[in-house]
Image (cartoon, rainbow, N blue to C red):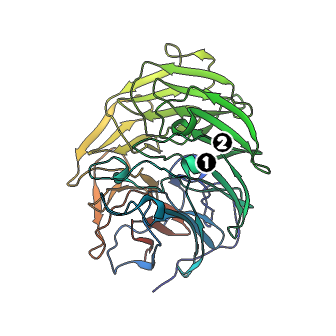
């Protein structure tokens, strides 16, 4: 099989050869400036390598140099109504980026009891490994819900372990670590109803912001045009901006209710989000900015997938695929795709938007104001779920199913 090109130069922001070191990549944006990415693939076409994983998971892979890291679970939660919880095990897996071979696997015994996996349970929709690791290039940071946050070196050796709460929920735990300067920030809404910042070197708590309810999403760092950085999180009753250095609340937009899963995305100081409606919020406000900083409210909703901003448009899929004008919130198009639900968040790159459905394959659409389906790609020999968001790595896509990690490269 043909290998993708690999550059040895590492850069920070989307470029050829860039590392992808957190959920949805640089800035949590779900975008890449790489070109030449594949449009079509199958079980045999444009497959660079495919690696059988130790178990399923909803977390996405990350890439650092010639290594890929991701999490899995095994022993329990594989079939509803079957198995014993005390056999549950979580895994951190390191895979060779060029060859696809597993270099090592580290096992993490969970703190029990976890939320139960049973017939018809919501936990059964995604399992026990939904948090994507994060890296600062020196260490790995992994979140396993009530079992805590682990910091390891790049070979998986534990440096510290921190507790962020013992709460559980029937929908499990999902949020991924966010790194800011010397801090690891965790949305521990389920575990303790808090945003918690830990010192990267020691794991000791630096600050805690309480009152984060029913929030299954990863916060996003937003650069404010007039200077500074804000951490923005979607919470049950509000969208909240906080000071990432100390957890102090800066602003909030209210008028919501219910649980919320989608993360926000940001572009040039504007925060975009989708929950029971789509919104654009100007960052940088103070206090309750519901009436002053909401730029528009648009049609459409999403229960799980986050949106993606790409070249002036906002895209997401949850049943229908939506495209909104990011400047005005006006609906550009809404089209039903011939498949079931989406849990993965879309990826935008190379003039294309990749939408990964749970069981119906990957839909590749042309970016822009006209709906154009370029391809629908499925693996004929893998009917397992695909809940994880895809990533870009050196001219290839890395796509994780419940059985495999697949490197898809254009030939």
Measure the alpha-carbon separation of dots 1 and 2: 6 Å
Left or right: 196 in relation to 202: left
| Residue found 45% across the figure and 66% down from its top | 74
In-image side of 100 versus 139 (left or right): left
Kindly give the residue lying farthest to the right in the view shown: 201
Instruction: Please state which of residues 161 and 263 is positioned toward the viewer in this rendering.
Output: 161
Asked whether residue 312 is in view, the answer is: yes
Q: Which residue is mark 2?
A: 185
Say if 326 sits above or below 44 in the image: above
In this picture, residue 203 sits left or right of residue 252: right
Name the residue rendered at 43%, 43% in the picture: 306
Viewer can see residue 12: no
Secondary element at image label 2: strand
Please name the residue that numbered disc 1 is placed on: 177
Q: Position of residue 106 (x, y in %)?
A: 61, 69
Q: How many marks?
A: 2
Seen from the viewer's position, the closer of residues 139 and 250 is: 139
Image location of residue 287, percent across then percent down: 61, 15
Observer-nearest of 282 and 362: 362
Does 199 appear above or below 80? above
Q: Earlier in the sequence, mark 1 or mark 2?
A: 1
* Circles 1, 2 touching at the beta carbon (< 8 Å): yes
Residue under the point 45% across and 28% down: 236
The local crowd at label 2, few if under 14, some if 14 to 19, many if 20 or more residues have their Cα within 10 Å, is many
Q: Is residue 16 above or below residue 345?
A: below
């Amino acid at each position: 099989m043909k290998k993708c090109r690999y550059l040895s130069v590492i850069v920070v922001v989307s470029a050829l050869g860039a590392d992808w070191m957190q959920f949805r990549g640089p800035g949590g944006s779900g975008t890449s400036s790489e070109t030449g990415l594949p449009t079509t693939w199958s079980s045999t076409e444009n497959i660079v390598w495919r690696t059988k994983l130790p178990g399923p998971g909803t977390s996405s892979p990350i890439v650092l140099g010639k290594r890929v890291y991701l999490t899995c679970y095994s022993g329990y939660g594989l079939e509803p109504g079957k198995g014993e919880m005390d056999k549950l095990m979580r895994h951190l897996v390191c895979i060779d980026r060029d060859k696809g071979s597993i270099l090592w696997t580290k096992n993490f015994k969970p703190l029990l009891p976890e939320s139960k996996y049973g017939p018809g349970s919501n936990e059964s929709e995604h399992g026990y490994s939904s948090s994507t690791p994060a890296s600062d290039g020196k260490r790995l940071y992994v979140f396993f819900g009530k079992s805590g946050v682990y910091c390891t070196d790049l070979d998986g050796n534990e440096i510290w372990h921190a507790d962020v709460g013992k709460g559980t929920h029937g929908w499990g735990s999902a949020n991924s670590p966010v790194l800011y300067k010397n801090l690891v920030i965790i949305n521990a809404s389920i575990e303790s109803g808090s945003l918690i910042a830990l010192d990267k070197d020691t794991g000791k708590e630096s600050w805690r912001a309480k009152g984060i309810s029913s929030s299954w999403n990863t916060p996003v760092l937003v650069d404010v045009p007039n200077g500074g950085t804000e951490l923005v999180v979607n919470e049950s009753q509000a969208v909240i901006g906080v000071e990432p250095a100390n957890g102090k609340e800066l602003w909030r937009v209210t008028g919501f209710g219910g649980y919320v899963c989608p993360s926000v995305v940001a572009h040039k100081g504007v925060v975009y989000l989708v929950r029971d409606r789509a919104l654009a919020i100007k960052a940088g406000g103070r206090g309750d900015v519901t009436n002053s900083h909401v730029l528009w409210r648009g049609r459409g909703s999403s229960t799980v997938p986050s949106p993606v901003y790409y070249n002036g448009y906002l895209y997401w899929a949850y049943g229908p695929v939506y495209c909104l004008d990011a400047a005005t919130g006006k609906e550009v198009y809404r089209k039903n795709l011939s498949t079931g639900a989406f849990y993965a968040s879309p990826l935008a790159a190379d003039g294309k938007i990749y939408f990964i459905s749970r069981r119906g394959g990957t839909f590749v659409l042309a970016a822009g104001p006209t709906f154009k389906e370029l391809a629908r790609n499925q693996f004929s020999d893998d009917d397992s779920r695909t809940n994880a968001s895809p990533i870009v790595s050196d001219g290839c896509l890395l796509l994780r199913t419940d059985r495999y990690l697949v490197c898809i490269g254009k030939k």
